[in-house]
Image: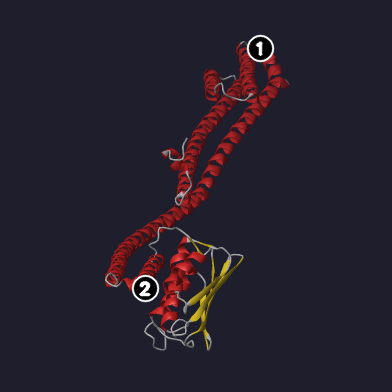
Protein backbone atom coordinates (compact mmCIF):
# COMPACT_ATOMS: atom_id res chain seq x y z
CA UNK A 1 0.00 0.00 0.00
CA UNK A 2 1.48 3.35 -1.03
CA UNK A 3 1.75 6.46 1.14
CA UNK A 4 -0.81 8.25 -1.09
CA UNK A 5 -3.39 5.49 -0.77
CA UNK A 6 -6.67 6.96 0.61
CA UNK A 7 -7.16 4.09 3.04
CA UNK A 8 -3.69 4.56 4.46
CA UNK A 9 -4.22 8.31 4.80
CA UNK A 10 -7.48 7.58 6.64
CA UNK A 11 -5.70 5.36 9.17
CA UNK A 12 -2.80 7.74 9.61
CA UNK A 13 -3.02 9.41 13.08
CA UNK A 14 -3.59 13.14 12.98
CA UNK A 15 -5.31 15.97 14.77
CA UNK A 16 -8.63 14.05 14.87
CA UNK A 17 -7.25 10.85 16.41
CA UNK A 18 -8.37 11.77 19.92
CA UNK A 19 -11.90 12.49 18.63
CA UNK A 20 -12.06 9.13 16.85
CA UNK A 21 -10.79 7.31 19.95
CA UNK A 22 -13.31 9.03 22.22
CA UNK A 23 -16.15 8.39 19.77
CA UNK A 24 -15.07 4.75 19.65
CA UNK A 25 -15.13 4.57 23.44
CA UNK A 26 -18.58 6.18 23.52
CA UNK A 27 -19.81 3.68 20.92
CA UNK A 28 -18.33 0.80 22.94
CA UNK A 29 -19.95 2.15 26.11
CA UNK A 30 -23.32 2.44 24.31
CA UNK A 31 -23.06 -1.11 23.00
CA UNK A 32 -21.98 -2.36 26.43
CA UNK A 33 -24.85 -0.50 28.09
CA UNK A 34 -27.36 -1.96 25.64
CA UNK A 35 -25.96 -5.46 26.20
CA UNK A 36 -26.11 -5.03 29.98
CA UNK A 37 -29.67 -3.74 29.79
CA UNK A 38 -30.62 -6.63 27.56
CA UNK A 39 -28.94 -9.02 30.00
CA UNK A 40 -30.78 -7.44 32.92
CA UNK A 41 -34.11 -7.67 31.08
CA UNK A 42 -33.40 -11.30 30.15
CA UNK A 43 -32.41 -12.08 33.76
CA UNK A 44 -35.56 -10.40 35.07
CA UNK A 45 -37.72 -12.30 32.60
CA UNK A 46 -35.99 -15.55 33.55
CA UNK A 47 -36.50 -14.78 37.24
CA UNK A 48 -40.20 -14.18 36.65
CA UNK A 49 -40.52 -17.34 34.59
CA UNK A 50 -38.62 -19.26 37.26
CA UNK A 51 -40.92 -17.84 39.92
CA UNK A 52 -43.96 -19.06 37.99
CA UNK A 53 -42.30 -22.44 37.40
CA UNK A 54 -41.22 -22.81 41.03
CA UNK A 55 -44.68 -21.90 42.25
CA UNK A 56 -46.24 -24.49 39.93
CA UNK A 57 -43.76 -27.17 41.06
CA UNK A 58 -44.39 -26.38 44.73
CA UNK A 59 -48.15 -26.57 44.19
CA UNK A 60 -47.74 -29.91 42.40
CA UNK A 61 -45.56 -31.25 45.24
CA UNK A 62 -48.08 -30.12 47.83
CA UNK A 63 -50.89 -31.68 45.82
CA UNK A 64 -48.97 -34.98 45.80
CA UNK A 65 -48.38 -34.70 49.55
CA UNK A 66 -51.99 -33.67 50.18
CA UNK A 67 -53.39 -36.62 48.21
CA UNK A 68 -51.29 -39.02 50.29
CA UNK A 69 -52.39 -37.39 53.54
CA UNK A 70 -56.06 -37.26 52.47
CA UNK A 71 -55.97 -40.86 51.39
CA UNK A 72 -54.47 -41.93 54.71
CA UNK A 73 -57.03 -39.81 56.62
CA UNK A 74 -59.92 -41.44 54.73
CA UNK A 75 -58.46 -44.92 55.32
CA UNK A 76 -58.14 -44.22 59.10
CA UNK A 77 -61.70 -42.87 59.32
CA UNK A 78 -63.14 -45.86 57.47
CA UNK A 79 -61.24 -48.27 59.72
CA UNK A 80 -62.48 -46.59 62.89
CA UNK A 81 -66.14 -46.05 61.91
CA UNK A 82 -66.63 -48.70 59.21
CA UNK A 83 -68.73 -46.00 57.52
CA UNK A 84 -68.08 -45.80 53.76
CA UNK A 85 -68.79 -42.09 53.83
CA UNK A 86 -65.37 -41.64 55.41
CA UNK A 87 -63.79 -43.19 52.32
CA UNK A 88 -64.53 -40.07 50.26
CA UNK A 89 -61.08 -38.43 50.88
CA UNK A 90 -59.39 -41.72 50.08
CA UNK A 91 -61.34 -42.27 46.91
CA UNK A 92 -60.79 -38.69 45.70
CA UNK A 93 -57.05 -38.91 46.46
CA UNK A 94 -56.80 -42.27 44.67
CA UNK A 95 -58.18 -40.62 41.51
CA UNK A 96 -55.90 -37.57 41.82
CA UNK A 97 -52.45 -38.91 42.72
CA UNK A 98 -51.59 -40.30 39.28
CA UNK A 99 -52.48 -37.04 37.43
CA UNK A 100 -50.61 -35.08 40.12
CA UNK A 101 -47.49 -37.21 39.64
CA UNK A 102 -47.76 -36.83 35.85
CA UNK A 103 -48.16 -33.04 36.19
CA UNK A 104 -45.13 -32.86 38.50
CA UNK A 105 -42.99 -34.84 36.08
CA UNK A 106 -44.17 -32.67 33.19
CA UNK A 107 -43.35 -29.45 35.09
CA UNK A 108 -39.85 -30.58 35.96
CA UNK A 109 -39.25 -31.72 32.39
CA UNK A 110 -36.15 -33.45 31.10
CA UNK A 111 -33.62 -30.68 31.90
CA UNK A 112 -33.25 -31.45 35.58
CA UNK A 113 -30.28 -32.40 37.69
CA UNK A 114 -29.59 -36.07 38.44
CA UNK A 115 -30.54 -35.44 42.07
CA UNK A 116 -33.90 -33.99 41.09
CA UNK A 117 -34.46 -36.95 38.79
CA UNK A 118 -33.80 -39.41 41.61
CA UNK A 119 -36.06 -37.49 43.99
CA UNK A 120 -38.83 -37.42 41.38
CA UNK A 121 -38.52 -41.18 40.93
CA UNK A 122 -38.56 -41.69 44.70
CA UNK A 123 -41.71 -39.54 45.07
CA UNK A 124 -43.40 -41.49 42.29
CA UNK A 125 -42.39 -44.83 43.78
CA UNK A 126 -43.22 -43.92 47.40
CA UNK A 127 -46.60 -42.42 46.44
CA UNK A 128 -47.57 -45.53 44.51
CA UNK A 129 -46.32 -47.70 47.37
CA UNK A 130 -48.36 -45.70 49.88
CA UNK A 131 -51.53 -45.98 47.83
CA UNK A 132 -50.89 -49.72 47.33
CA UNK A 133 -50.60 -50.14 51.07
CA UNK A 134 -53.75 -48.07 51.67
CA UNK A 135 -55.67 -50.00 49.02
CA UNK A 136 -54.74 -53.31 50.66
CA UNK A 137 -55.88 -52.19 54.13
CA UNK A 138 -59.16 -50.81 52.72
CA UNK A 139 -59.76 -54.14 50.96
CA UNK A 140 -59.19 -55.97 54.27
CA UNK A 141 -61.72 -53.74 55.99
CA UNK A 142 -64.27 -54.21 53.24
CA UNK A 143 -63.91 -57.99 53.42
CA UNK A 144 -64.29 -57.96 57.22
CA UNK A 145 -60.67 -58.85 57.95
CA UNK A 146 -60.32 -56.20 60.59
CA UNK A 147 -57.46 -57.93 62.40
CA UNK A 148 -55.39 -58.08 59.21
CA UNK A 149 -56.25 -54.46 58.50
CA UNK A 150 -55.33 -53.49 62.07
CA UNK A 151 -51.98 -55.29 61.85
CA UNK A 152 -51.24 -53.61 58.49
CA UNK A 153 -52.12 -50.18 59.89
CA UNK A 154 -50.07 -50.63 63.06
CA UNK A 155 -46.89 -51.70 61.23
CA UNK A 156 -44.13 -49.12 60.68
CA UNK A 157 -44.10 -49.73 56.91
CA UNK A 158 -46.81 -47.19 56.11
CA UNK A 159 -45.41 -44.59 58.51
CA UNK A 160 -41.89 -45.02 57.16
CA UNK A 161 -43.14 -44.69 53.58
CA UNK A 162 -45.01 -41.52 54.50
CA UNK A 163 -41.95 -40.00 56.22
CA UNK A 164 -39.68 -40.85 53.28
CA UNK A 165 -42.26 -39.31 50.93
CA UNK A 166 -42.35 -36.11 53.01
CA UNK A 167 -38.53 -35.96 53.06
CA UNK A 168 -38.29 -36.40 49.28
CA UNK A 169 -40.97 -33.77 48.68
CA UNK A 170 -39.28 -31.37 51.15
CA UNK A 171 -35.85 -31.79 49.50
CA UNK A 172 -37.27 -31.24 46.03
CA UNK A 173 -39.06 -28.12 47.30
CA UNK A 174 -35.75 -26.85 48.78
CA UNK A 175 -33.96 -27.39 45.46
CA UNK A 176 -36.64 -25.46 43.58
CA UNK A 177 -36.41 -22.61 46.08
CA UNK A 178 -32.61 -22.50 45.68
CA UNK A 179 -32.97 -22.28 41.88
CA UNK A 180 -35.54 -19.51 42.29
CA UNK A 181 -33.32 -17.54 44.70
CA UNK A 182 -30.35 -17.92 42.35
CA UNK A 183 -32.43 -16.54 39.48
CA UNK A 184 -33.45 -13.58 41.66
CA UNK A 185 -29.83 -12.92 42.64
CA UNK A 186 -28.73 -13.00 38.98
CA UNK A 187 -31.46 -10.53 38.09
CA UNK A 188 -30.45 -8.26 40.98
CA UNK A 189 -26.79 -8.36 39.96
CA UNK A 190 -27.69 -7.52 36.38
CA UNK A 191 -29.76 -4.58 37.56
CA UNK A 192 -26.93 -3.44 39.85
CA UNK A 193 -24.49 -3.37 36.92
CA UNK A 194 -26.75 -1.08 34.90
CA UNK A 195 -26.33 2.02 37.10
CA UNK A 196 -22.48 2.11 37.06
CA UNK A 197 -22.51 1.46 33.33
CA UNK A 198 -24.97 4.30 32.82
CA UNK A 199 -22.73 6.60 34.87
CA UNK A 200 -19.69 5.62 32.79
CA UNK A 201 -21.70 6.13 29.63
CA UNK A 202 -22.80 9.55 30.87
CA UNK A 203 -19.16 10.50 31.52
CA UNK A 204 -18.15 9.42 28.02
CA UNK A 205 -21.06 11.31 26.47
CA UNK A 206 -20.16 14.47 28.41
CA UNK A 207 -16.52 14.07 27.36
CA UNK A 208 -17.63 13.64 23.74
CA UNK A 209 -19.76 16.77 24.00
CA UNK A 210 -16.86 18.75 25.49
CA UNK A 211 -14.49 17.46 22.83
CA UNK A 212 -17.06 18.25 20.14
CA UNK A 213 -17.42 21.81 21.40
CA UNK A 214 -13.65 22.12 21.58
CA UNK A 215 -13.35 20.87 18.01
CA UNK A 216 -16.02 23.36 16.90
CA UNK A 217 -14.21 26.26 18.61
CA UNK A 218 -10.87 25.11 17.22
CA UNK A 219 -12.34 24.81 13.73
CA UNK A 220 -13.83 28.29 14.03
CA UNK A 221 -10.49 29.63 15.23
CA UNK A 222 -8.72 27.82 12.39
CA UNK A 223 -11.15 29.30 9.88
CA UNK A 224 -10.60 32.76 11.37
CA UNK A 225 -6.85 32.24 11.23
CA UNK A 226 -7.12 31.02 7.64
CA UNK A 227 -9.13 34.08 6.70
CA UNK A 228 -6.60 36.32 8.47
CA UNK A 229 -3.75 34.44 6.81
CA UNK A 230 -5.42 34.97 3.45
CA UNK A 231 -5.68 38.69 4.15
CA UNK A 232 -2.03 38.75 5.18
CA UNK A 233 -1.09 36.84 2.04
CA UNK A 234 -2.98 39.31 -0.10
CA UNK A 235 -1.31 42.24 1.72
CA UNK A 236 2.07 40.54 1.30
CA UNK A 237 1.40 40.04 -2.39
CA UNK A 238 0.53 43.73 -2.74
CA UNK A 239 3.70 44.69 -0.82
CA UNK A 240 5.79 42.36 -2.98
CA UNK A 241 4.22 43.88 -6.09
CA UNK A 242 5.06 47.39 -4.87
CA UNK A 243 8.59 46.28 -3.94
CA UNK A 244 9.10 44.74 -7.37
CA UNK A 245 7.75 47.87 -8.99
CA UNK A 246 10.04 50.07 -6.90
CA UNK A 247 13.00 47.82 -7.57
CA UNK A 248 12.23 47.93 -11.28
CA UNK A 249 12.09 51.72 -11.21
CA UNK A 250 15.40 51.90 -9.29
CA UNK A 251 17.04 49.65 -11.85
CA UNK A 252 15.63 51.84 -14.62
CA UNK A 253 17.13 54.86 -12.86
CA UNK A 254 20.49 53.10 -12.71
CA UNK A 255 20.18 52.34 -16.42
CA UNK A 256 19.28 55.99 -17.19
CA UNK A 257 22.19 57.29 -15.10
CA UNK A 258 24.55 54.82 -16.76
CA UNK A 259 23.34 55.91 -20.22
CA UNK A 260 23.75 59.61 -19.32
CA UNK A 261 27.31 58.99 -18.09
CA UNK A 262 28.25 57.11 -21.24
CA UNK A 263 26.63 59.72 -23.52
CA UNK A 264 28.39 62.50 -21.65
CA UNK A 265 31.82 60.93 -22.28
CA UNK A 266 31.21 59.99 -25.90
CA UNK A 267 32.58 63.29 -27.28
CA UNK A 268 35.50 63.45 -24.81
CA UNK A 269 37.97 60.60 -25.44
CA UNK A 270 40.26 61.91 -22.73
CA UNK A 271 37.45 61.30 -20.18
CA UNK A 272 37.02 57.65 -21.19
CA UNK A 273 38.95 56.23 -18.16
CA UNK A 274 36.82 58.31 -15.81
CA UNK A 275 33.63 57.28 -17.59
CA UNK A 276 34.62 53.62 -17.32
CA UNK A 277 35.33 53.98 -13.60
CA UNK A 278 31.99 55.68 -13.06
CA UNK A 279 30.22 52.96 -15.11
CA UNK A 280 31.93 50.26 -13.07
CA UNK A 281 30.84 52.02 -9.87
CA UNK A 282 27.24 52.20 -11.13
CA UNK A 283 27.30 48.49 -12.11
CA UNK A 284 28.66 47.56 -8.67
CA UNK A 285 26.07 49.72 -6.97
CA UNK A 286 23.32 48.03 -9.03
CA UNK A 287 24.65 44.59 -8.03
CA UNK A 288 24.74 45.61 -4.37
CA UNK A 289 21.18 46.90 -4.68
CA UNK A 290 19.96 43.59 -6.11
CA UNK A 291 21.68 41.65 -3.32
CA UNK A 292 20.35 43.84 -0.53
CA UNK A 293 16.84 43.77 -2.00
CA UNK A 294 16.82 40.00 -2.24
CA UNK A 295 16.61 39.85 -6.02
CA UNK A 296 19.78 37.87 -6.54
CA UNK A 297 19.44 34.47 -8.17
CA UNK A 298 21.60 32.86 -5.47
CA UNK A 299 19.81 30.96 -2.70
CA UNK A 300 22.76 31.50 -0.32
CA UNK A 301 25.97 33.54 -0.34
CA UNK A 302 29.42 33.63 1.16
CA UNK A 303 29.95 36.32 3.73
CA UNK A 304 33.15 37.57 2.07
CA UNK A 305 31.37 37.96 -1.29
CA UNK A 306 28.45 39.78 0.34
CA UNK A 307 30.85 42.25 2.01
CA UNK A 308 32.78 42.70 -1.23
CA UNK A 309 29.65 43.32 -3.33
CA UNK A 310 28.27 45.79 -0.78
CA UNK A 311 31.45 47.84 -0.35
CA UNK A 312 32.75 47.71 -3.93
CA UNK A 313 30.70 50.72 -5.24
CA UNK A 314 32.33 52.99 -2.62
CA UNK A 315 35.91 51.72 -2.90
CA UNK A 316 38.67 54.05 -4.18
CA UNK A 317 42.27 54.92 -3.33
CA UNK A 318 41.08 57.16 -0.50
CA UNK A 319 38.13 54.95 0.54
CA UNK A 320 39.63 51.61 1.36
CA UNK A 321 38.28 48.60 3.20
CA UNK A 322 39.79 45.50 4.77
CA UNK A 323 38.11 42.11 5.06
CA UNK A 324 39.28 39.41 7.48
CA UNK A 325 37.58 36.16 8.42
CA UNK A 326 37.08 32.51 7.54
CA UNK A 327 34.84 31.19 4.79
CA UNK A 328 31.26 31.32 6.01
CA UNK A 329 28.22 30.28 4.00
CA UNK A 330 25.25 32.40 4.97
CA UNK A 331 21.82 30.77 4.94
CA UNK A 332 19.26 32.14 2.54
CA UNK A 333 17.19 34.02 5.11
CA UNK A 334 20.18 35.88 6.55
CA UNK A 335 21.49 37.28 3.23
CA UNK A 336 18.92 40.05 2.80
CA UNK A 337 18.85 41.46 6.40
CA UNK A 338 22.64 41.31 6.72
CA UNK A 339 23.05 42.87 3.27
CA UNK A 340 20.71 45.71 4.29
CA UNK A 341 22.75 46.34 7.46
CA UNK A 342 26.05 46.38 5.55
CA UNK A 343 24.59 48.62 2.86
CA UNK A 344 23.25 51.05 5.48
CA UNK A 345 26.62 51.12 7.29
CA UNK A 346 28.47 51.70 4.00
CA UNK A 347 26.07 54.53 3.05
CA UNK A 348 26.50 56.17 6.45
CA UNK A 349 30.30 55.78 6.16
CA UNK A 350 30.18 57.73 2.89
CA UNK A 351 27.89 60.40 4.29
CA UNK A 352 29.13 60.85 7.85
CA UNK A 353 31.89 58.37 8.67
CA UNK A 354 35.29 57.14 7.56
CA UNK A 355 34.66 57.74 3.86
CA UNK A 356 33.13 61.20 4.21
CA UNK A 357 36.40 63.20 4.46
CA UNK A 358 38.62 64.24 1.59
CA UNK A 359 41.57 62.30 3.00
CA UNK A 360 39.40 59.20 3.22
CA UNK A 361 39.61 56.42 5.75
CA UNK A 362 39.57 52.69 6.19
CA UNK A 363 36.61 50.43 6.92
CA UNK A 364 37.62 47.11 8.47
CA UNK A 365 35.21 44.21 8.51
CA UNK A 366 36.28 41.22 10.59
CA UNK A 367 34.27 38.12 11.46
CA UNK A 368 34.73 34.82 13.24
CA UNK A 369 32.56 31.78 13.89
CA UNK A 370 32.14 30.34 17.39
CA UNK A 371 30.10 27.14 17.19
CA UNK A 372 26.84 28.39 15.58
CA UNK A 373 27.31 32.07 16.51
CA UNK A 374 28.63 34.43 13.84
CA UNK A 375 30.34 37.60 15.14
CA UNK A 376 30.98 40.47 12.71
CA UNK A 377 32.83 43.68 13.64
CA UNK A 378 32.54 46.83 11.51
CA UNK A 379 35.23 49.36 12.42
CA UNK A 380 35.82 52.77 10.82
CA UNK A 381 39.19 54.59 11.11
CA UNK A 382 39.90 58.05 9.75
CA UNK A 383 37.54 60.49 8.14
CA UNK A 384 35.03 62.45 10.18
CA UNK A 385 34.71 61.61 13.90
CA UNK A 386 31.90 59.15 14.71
CA UNK A 387 28.59 60.50 15.97
CA UNK A 388 25.05 59.16 16.27
CA UNK A 389 22.92 60.41 13.37
CA UNK A 390 19.82 59.41 11.56
CA UNK A 391 19.43 58.89 7.85
CA UNK A 392 19.09 62.60 7.24
CA UNK A 393 22.35 63.47 8.96
CA UNK A 394 20.65 64.90 12.03
CA UNK A 395 21.41 63.65 15.53
CA UNK A 396 18.96 61.03 16.79
CA UNK A 397 17.24 57.93 15.44
CA UNK A 398 15.70 57.69 11.99
CA UNK A 399 14.86 55.18 9.31
CA UNK A 400 18.44 53.84 9.18
CA UNK A 401 18.46 52.98 12.89
CA UNK A 402 15.02 51.38 12.63
CA UNK A 403 16.16 49.38 9.60
CA UNK A 404 19.22 48.09 11.49
CA UNK A 405 17.12 47.16 14.54
CA UNK A 406 14.55 45.38 12.36
CA UNK A 407 17.30 43.46 10.58
CA UNK A 408 18.71 42.39 13.95
CA UNK A 409 15.33 40.90 14.84
CA UNK A 410 15.19 39.06 11.51
CA UNK A 411 18.66 37.67 12.11
CA UNK A 412 17.67 36.53 15.59
CA UNK A 413 20.68 38.28 17.16
CA UNK A 414 21.89 41.70 18.24
CA UNK A 415 23.57 44.74 16.66
CA UNK A 416 25.42 47.15 18.95
CA UNK A 417 26.88 50.49 17.78
CA UNK A 418 29.58 52.42 19.61
CA UNK A 419 30.50 55.94 18.40
CA UNK A 420 34.18 56.41 19.34
CA UNK A 421 36.31 59.50 18.60
CA UNK A 422 38.36 57.58 16.04
CA UNK A 423 35.28 56.19 14.30
CA UNK A 424 32.21 53.98 14.46
CA UNK A 425 32.40 50.41 15.80
CA UNK A 426 29.50 48.04 15.16
CA UNK A 427 29.23 44.51 16.62
CA UNK A 428 26.84 42.13 14.84
CA UNK A 429 26.14 38.78 16.53
CA UNK A 430 23.56 36.22 15.43
CA UNK A 431 23.19 32.43 15.21
CA UNK A 432 23.42 30.93 11.76
CA UNK A 433 20.92 28.17 12.58
CA UNK A 434 18.19 30.60 13.71
CA UNK A 435 18.69 33.13 10.96
Task: Specify whether residue 73 is in view.
Answer: yes
Where residue 271 appears, as percent x and y from the top left, is: 33, 73
Foreground: 362 or 265? 265
Between 413 and 144, the residue placed more toward the observer is: 413
Residue 154, numbered circle = none
Specify the quadrant of the image occupied by residue 218: bottom left
The answer to whether 299 is drawn above or below residue 310 in the figure is above
Q: Secondary structure at mark 1?
A: loop
> Residue 221, located in which quarter of the rendered image?
bottom left
- Residue 261 falls in image quadrant: bottom left
Determine whether 148 is above or below 310 in the image. above
> Which numbered circle lies on residue 274?
2
Residue, disc 1 = 145
Q: Identify the residue shown where x is 53% and y is 30%.
A: 59
The residue located at (64%, 23%) in the rendering is 114
- Marks 2 and 1, Cα distance to the nearest angstrom? 169 Å
Between 272 and 290, the one nearer to me in the picture: 272
Check the image and name the residue furthest to the front: 270
* Labels 2, 1: front one: 2
Q: Sequence order check: which comes first, mark 2 or mark 1?
A: 1
Picture coordinates of residue 395, whole percent (x, y): 41, 89
- Callout 2 secondary element: helix
Within-10-Å neighbours for mark 2: few <14, some 14–19, many 20+:
few
Q: Is residue 435 visible?
A: no
Amino acid sequence: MSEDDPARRWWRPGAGSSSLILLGLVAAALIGGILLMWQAIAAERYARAQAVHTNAVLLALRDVSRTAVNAETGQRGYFITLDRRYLSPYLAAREQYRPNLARLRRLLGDEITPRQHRLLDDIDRLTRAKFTELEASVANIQSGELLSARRRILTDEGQETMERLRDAIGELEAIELVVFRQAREDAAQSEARIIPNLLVLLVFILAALVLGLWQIFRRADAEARAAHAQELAEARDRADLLARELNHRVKNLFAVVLAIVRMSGRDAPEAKPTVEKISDRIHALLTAHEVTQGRSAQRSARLAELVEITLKPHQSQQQRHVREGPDVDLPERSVVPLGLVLHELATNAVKYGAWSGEAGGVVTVRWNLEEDMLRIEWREDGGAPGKATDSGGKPGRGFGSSLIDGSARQLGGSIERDFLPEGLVVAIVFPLTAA
